[in-house]
Image (tube, rainbow, N blue to C red):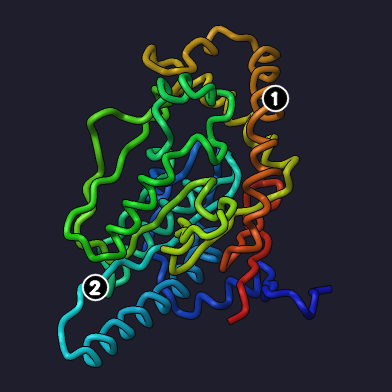
Amino acid sequence: MADAHSTFLELSRDEWARLRANTPLTLDEDELRELRGINEAVALDEVRDVYLPLSRLLNLRVSARQHLHEVTTNFLGALTPRVPFVIAIAGSVAVGKSTTARVLQALLARWPVHPTVELITTDGFLYPNDELVQRNLMDRKGFPESYDVRRLLSVLAELKSGAERVEVPLYSHTTYDVVPDDTLTITAADIVIVEGINVLQVPPTRAGVDQLHVSDYFDFSIYVDAAESDVERWYIERTFALRDGAFREPESFFHFLTPYSDDQVHEFATSIWEGINRRNLRENIAPTRSRADLVLYKGPDHAVEQVLLRKM
């Protein structure tokens, strides 16, 4: 039974799917194949039932924000710069944030009123590996202290100020490091999606210090959730898939895993999960779930079973 005092409306997948209304399915199977993450079998019916209603809700939110901009411009009697609508996507490692972000980016870009949708991943704001080694943080990569939060805040402030060009650092999952001297340039985006495990975290407030948090710049936030045991299994399965795929590239940081037996790979993945990712999930990521505007809860097969929408 739903908690009457909950701040969320709890909707089953069927209830949520009906909110699609007459929103057309604008992705086909070939396009979806390009958007799927490793070891994530997102099907077109998932797009229809879960992501189309979400894109409709977000489209309505963006339209309302654009109308508010027009009202403010009329009030001031002068043209003010339009700033992008910023969507955050949070959740554990291996829960499927990246696929959610890419699918939403593709769907939102097909709405006529906001064709320019950019995607930022916070991996690019990790400190470079050399610096993490110097700070003795390689074993805490992904924890809050491993990110250059000041730089992330600066980029978000530029976006929300209406800057014409914003440079965003990039990350390589092959080299497992920030890409030196390369950036994504964002110009005049209607929507910016910011995806990462850390986006809803709020650091401790220091007395007497005026602090801005990353989440202060978000217009809507999504948390992708699942049972911890399922996420652990997905992480281990993904490591196997990478061992047999991307890790075979000689320049891959984890190339050393390619000759490992299945038992060795399982032991390695389990140790990383228990020593780093599970701790980070419990200590820093899961506690931010209640701060999201919407929660997508996945079942053991990676399919969304329930949607929680914050009451207005």
Q: Is residue 221 left or right of residue 124?
A: right
Find residue 43 and report its horizontal and vertical position in percent.
53, 52
Viewer-closest of 156 and 7: 156
Rendered view: 83 above or below 205: below
Quadrant containing the N terminus in the rendered view? bottom right
Q: Residue at x 25, y 62 (%)?
A: 189
Rendered view: 143 above or below 217: above
The crowding category of the residue bearing disc 2, from other C-alpha atoms within 10 Å (few below 14, some 14 to 19, many at least 20), is: some
Q: Amino acid at mark 1?
A: Thr
Q: Residue at x 37, y 75 (%)?
A: 62
Q: Residue at x 58, y 71 (%)?
A: 17
Q: Considering only order in the chain, which callout, 2 or 1, is on the residue closer to the N terminus?
A: 2
Secondary structure state at the residue bearing disc 2: loop
Q: Mark 2 highlights which residue?
A: 82
Find residue 301 and report its horizontal and vertical position in percent.
67, 46
Rendered view: 74 above or below 11: below
Secondary structure state at the residue bearing disc 1: helix
Q: Amino acid at mark 2?
A: Arg
Which dot, 1 or 2, sits closer to the camera?
2
The crowding category of the residue bearing disc 1, from other C-alpha atoms within 10 Å (few below 14, some 14 to 19, many at least 20), is: some
Q: Is residue 5 left or right of residue 124?
A: right
The number of numbered discs placed on residues in the rendered structure image is: 2
Find residue 249 and report its horizontal and vertical position in percent.
39, 16
Indicate the quadrant where residue 184 lies. top left
Viewer-closest of 188 and 212: 212
Find residue 98 and report its horizontal and vertical position in percent.
47, 46
Indicate the quadrant where residue 161 lies. bottom left
Indicate the quadrant where residue 116 lies. bottom left
Q: Is residue 205 left or right of residue 26?
A: right
Q: Mark 1 highlights which residue?
A: 270
Quadrant containing the C terminus in the rendered view? bottom right
How far apart marks 1 and 2 lie (CA) works out to 47 Å
